[in-house]
Image (spheres, rainbow, N blue to C red):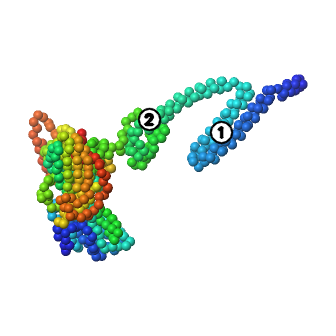
Amino acid sequence: MQKITDSLSPWWGTFNFELDQSKLWRLGPLTMILRCLSGEWQVSYERIEQYEDSDISVSDTDSIPEDLPELTRYVFRNPCRSLKITPLLADRPVISRPRIPFNLSAGEEITLYVSSPLWIELSAGNNAKKLGELSIQRPSDTWFGPSTLQGELCYATTTHCRINLVEIPERRYRAITPVIIRNNADTTLSLERLNLPSPQLSIYTSDDGRLWTSTVKLTREKDGDMAALRVIHKPPKEAPEAIILSQPRVASEAGVFIRAFNAVFS
Amino acid sequence: MMTELWTQIASFLTSDRLLSVIRAFMLFSLGFLIAKLVSATVVKIVQNKVDKHRNMLLRRGTFYLIILLFTISALKELGFDLSVLLGAAGIFSVAIGFASQTSASNLISGLFLVAERPFSVGDVIRVGSTTGEVLAIDLLSVKLRTYDNLYVRLPNESLIKSEVTTLTRFPIRRIDIQVGVAYKEDLKKVREILYAVADKNPLSLEEPKPAYIFQGFGESSLNIQFSVWAKRENFLNLKNSIHEEIKNAFDENGIEIPFPYRTLYSGSVTEPFPVKQVKPTPTNRNQAL
């Protein structure tokens, strides 16, 4: 099994295949095999529970997609030999729950780093026709809203909510989102849950191969869980030279208030 | 005598009475013709828009209505007093009113149902033991399609009077899982296992949190209710997958879901019943004989 990349080279980008060739992706919990056949692409994958964060590799393989459980075939009239892999963010907002809830006093501002789960988009051909997408980790569904009658379906993850960049572990299969929270209200904000509008963020890649997203700024103007949301569509200041890899799924509007903290359920 | 008869006939023929009889007869025949013409025309106009029954109803309806009108005016010509007829019609309509009580009630209930809007076309409702998707909310009844593809007609009156559950009103739904574990099990461990199963299943919502409710000390088991939430569309998928996962998790951890137990007891303090295994005696029919 010849390794094409080591853990510092990207697992995304355009990959050229020979006819009947298979390549294997190991991205933390996800194992994916792609095979180029005459007139079709075969994609199969498997998610495992025991994995290491450093298990990131792309290699040629003798295994075939039938070796893994979930198999899909994409058929084409004009076959092509190159496949493009793009990382994407979640298609729903992601609710991050800090491992240890913390408090932000009135008038304070803090920048947190939250890691976001990633999706993989596969596209083939010269005009990059989208074949499909799959998630590296299938996050749990959750409901975020004021009650069981209203709200929206989101994904749930837990986060360490790190304040120092150096503490963030190396996880190439997730992207880092800088979140600036400003508490302009008179009361302390007790943060138990953070609503990240993932579909509105872009993905950037920095020189060291890390994946970043657009910066999210949440300003809490008055008591309660609502905050003014602003998405900064530029590379984050922690990696100003980063280049954009993928566009947001939905356009973000300026001056929108969202329920950003703590869903209340009776 | 013949002369008298002729005189009578002659006087009758020249009287006003005859003219009115002729007028009445002409009115009647004219009415008949007009009724036939109008009903045919009406049918031609709406031919493609209504079905056969309505077609026939419309044709007969207009025909008899027009004939009735002309008959009434013909009778009036002949000198009949119509107030008697009106009295009879009044009594007739009261009788109709009593007979159509339920239909009127259904009609009014239908109007209230539309105004209140507890459900609309496309929702799934449960009335009594019937569950189905609402196909139409009509004047007198609501039509459902059950899950096994049968057509059910529910009178509006019964919907106003009884309890109607709309299953598709809210976006998320809770599944209550009743599970019993043997008395020997550690409840804390069972609780942890159940929460872990819900956590692992991606369809089970993280918020609202799954609820662990101890129901009681049952006859043969400790009865626990474990409730998980799911998006309404995923309800059936989650229901099936989580029961399976709970069973597997219990098997892996050696947690017993007991069969009903019965303890045999023959006094205040019973010694264990001795059970001795005896070799079966060979049955040799020839020997017995």
Mark 2 surroundings: few (<14), some (14-19) or many (≥20) residues within 10 A: few
Q: Front-most of B187 and A1?
A: A1
Quadrant of the snapshot with the N terminus of chain B: top right
Residue B200 horizontal/vertical position (percent): 21, 53
Residue B76 horizontal/vertical position (percent): 71, 28
Q: Front-most of A212 and B231?
A: A212
Q: Front-most of A103 and B75?
A: A103
Residue A36 horizontal/vertical position (percent): 30, 72
Q: Which residue is mark 2?
A: B112
Mark 1 surroundings: few (<14), some (14-19) or many (≥20) residues within 10 A: many
Residue A190 horizontal/vertical position (percent): 17, 44
Q: Which residue is mark 1?
A: B63
Rendered image quadrant of residue B2: top right
* Residue drawn where x is 19% and y is 58% of the image: A237
Q: What chain is tagged by disc 2?
A: B
* Mark nearer the N terminus (2 vs 1): 1
Instruction: Please determine whether, in this image, residue B128 is positioned above or below residue A46.
Output: above
Amino acid type, label 2? Phe
